Image (cartoon, rainbow, N blue to C red):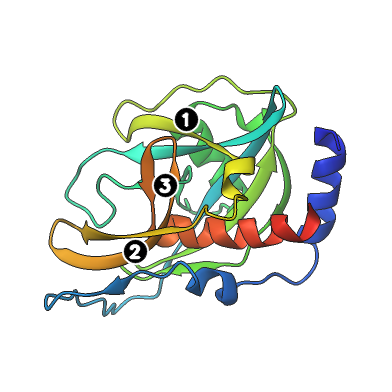
Amino acid sequence: MNFGEWVDKLTRRLAQPLPGALAHNAMRATFIGAVKPNFEHKLPPKPGSVLILLYPNLDAIQFPLTLRADYLGTHSGQVSLPGGKAEPGEDYKATALRECEEEIGVNRNDIEVIGRLSDFFVMPSNFMVAPVVGICRARPEFKADPVEVVKILVGDVADLLRPDAIRQKEILAAKQFRMLAPHFEIDGEVVWGATAMMLNEFRTILLEII
């Protein structure tokens, strides 16, 4: 199956009912320490989007992720899909494409949106995230934002689909909360939490169409 045929098959599947919480919950980390955070929020969730950007590279189908810079925030130093907060007047597609261009330098006009996954509530930061699926017909040139992105990682769809792709380990979240975290290992980095949960919905869909 060539890339175009694979994309057509994926596009048709994304238009059908999605696995949603069933796939998300399989990757949900659990607290194992005595210290636990308080995730109460007084305001409604902020809208945001992330982008799973698929492209062919030789015989592989790949996608980028970002290693975030360290900062005084909930997701400091974590691996994420390109994305962020919606600006006033933006829909979920516009947000995903703009953030991708800003964070990893891919021109939004070179990206074709083929669908989306289930909305995902990121409890620690109070975001309602729309995961967008897009493609480039050729491998894009990446340029990391020097402030937000420490490194651009490359994931391979074939590795995501391996029977042993899901692993588990103890991590220290926000440098203080002990958690047992199901995760993927992508390009030498541990991918857990919201990003892993969204990727697992994507993985679940892919396993249906291969």
Q: Please state which of residues 180 and 192 is positioned toward the viewer in this rendering.
A: 180
Judged by depth in the image, the label closer to the viewer, 2 or 3, is 2
Residue visible at 56% across and 27% down in the picture: 106
Q: Tell me the quarter of the image containing the N terminus.
A: top right
User: Which quadrant of the structure image shows residue 41?
Assistant: bottom left
- Label 3 CA crowd tier, 10 Å (few <14, some 14–19, many 20+): many
Label 3: state its secondary structure: strand
- Could you say where residue 21 lies in the image, as x and y percent from the top left? 56, 75
Dot 2 or dot 3, earlier in sequence: 3
Cα gap from disc 1 to disc 3, whole angstroms:
12 Å
**Which residue is under mark 1?**
104
Dot 2 or dot 1, earlier in sequence: 1
Dot 1 or dot 3, earlier in sequence: 3
Q: Which mark is residue 181?
A: 2
- Could you say where residue 60 lies in the image, as x and y percent from the top left? 68, 31
User: Which quadrant of the structure image shows residue 178?
Assistant: bottom left
Q: Please state which of residues 158 and 63 is positioned toward the viewer in this rendering.
A: 158
Residue visible at 59% across and 45% down in the picture: 52
Label 1: state its secondary structure: helix
**Which residue is under mark 3?**
80
- Please state which amino acid type lies under the numbered disc 3: Ser
**Residue 91 shows in this picture:** no
